[in-house]
Amino acid sequence: MTAHLGEIISLLVAVSWTATALFADEASHRLGSLTVNVIRLVLGSVFLALILWFTIGAPYPKYADGATWFWLALSALVGYLFGDYCLFNSYLIIGARFGQLFMTLAPPMAAIAGWAMLGETLSWRSILAMVVTISGIAISILAKGQGQKVHFTLPVKGILLGLGAGAGQGVGLVLSKVGMQHYEAALPADAVDAMGTMMPFAATMIRAVVGGLGFVMMLLIQRQGRNFLEVTRKDGKGVRYAVLTTLFGPVIGVSLSLMAVQYARAGIASTLMALTPVLIILPYALIHKQKVKPKELLGVAVSMLGVAMFFLL
């Protein structure tokens, strides 16, 4: 069992993120996506502060300089404020099952962003993986109607939100990578060992704080502050779903994902952690009493093949 500890942890991450998607779907329908994101990121910031406090003795990202804050804040605006806003709103229109399918676009978008912003190589294998991933999504959401005309099986608004979610996640990941590079460069020599393991948590806290503030600002701009208080006061079950979303996502999911890459090859760990679109099919269908079409299963399988090609080729 120890020999495959990293792979086992990676599968637990996929299960954790599947639970996150299911809880987020329920919470968004009950409270609204904006309310859920405010609760999730504010609570996530608190949990991460506690983790840092117990591990490095300070409830804040130690040694993070201005450049680190800038790039990680930018990644939060792209990944959280834009990407997660799109994702949680897509749950309201097309559900978590299809919302998570669009998240398989994150690796292609990250590859394109890495090529554009960091000068990373975009190999023919990566391009092929993009084509396979997009083909899988197309299989799931396209169908032939009368006169053999191809049409979407999902609302266009939900599709656009799903595309935005995948793009936000992928580009936000690359911006996070830039921020982490600046963070690592800012660490004093005598703090590298102490902060090495916890630096991703500290970086995640910066993103959570900025993302949370962004959603609070959005709440105030849309003058939904009173509605936020009323909804959270009246719907305790929705709030519990939002708390579970926080625990299984930013806290348990992120923590286990960091452990996974310590014990398994990054490519294998990343592929296993990306299994959420597969794992969510059965529980989502049972909860919502939906029938899953064979072509939808085929589409998920093809998309996952594309994701695996990114990490394993």
Image: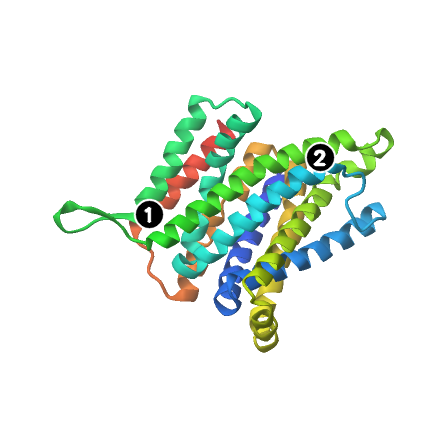
Residue type (three-letter) at the residue carrying disc 1: Ser
Viewer-side residue, 258 vs 8:
258
Left-right relation of 95 to 28: left
Tell me the quarter of the picture where residue 235 sits.
bottom right
Residue type (three-letter) at the residue carrying disc 2: Ala
Tell me the SS state at disc 2. helix
- Report if residue 119 is visible in the image: yes
Residue shown at the point (64%, 47%) measured from the top left = 254
Where residue 102 appears, x then y in whole percent? 43, 46
Which residue is most to the left?
A: 147
Q: Closer to the N terminus: mark 1 or mark 2?
A: 2
Category of crowding for the residue at label 1, using alpha-carbon neighbours closer than 10 angstroms: few (below 14), some (14–19), many (at least 20) = many
Where residue 246 appears, x then y in whole percent? 62, 58
Residue annotated with mark 1: 140
Give residue 183's mark. none
Where residue 38 appears, x then y in whole percent? 61, 60
Residue annotated with mark 2: 67
Tell me the SS state at disc 1. helix
Viewer-side residue, 64 vs 289:
64
Residue shown at the point (68%, 35%) measured from the top left = 180
Residue shown at the point (33%, 60%) measured from the top left = 291
Front: mark 1 or 2 = 2
Tell me the quarter of the picture where residue 2 sits.
top right
In the rendered image, the vertical position of residue 165 relative to residue 38, given as above or below: above
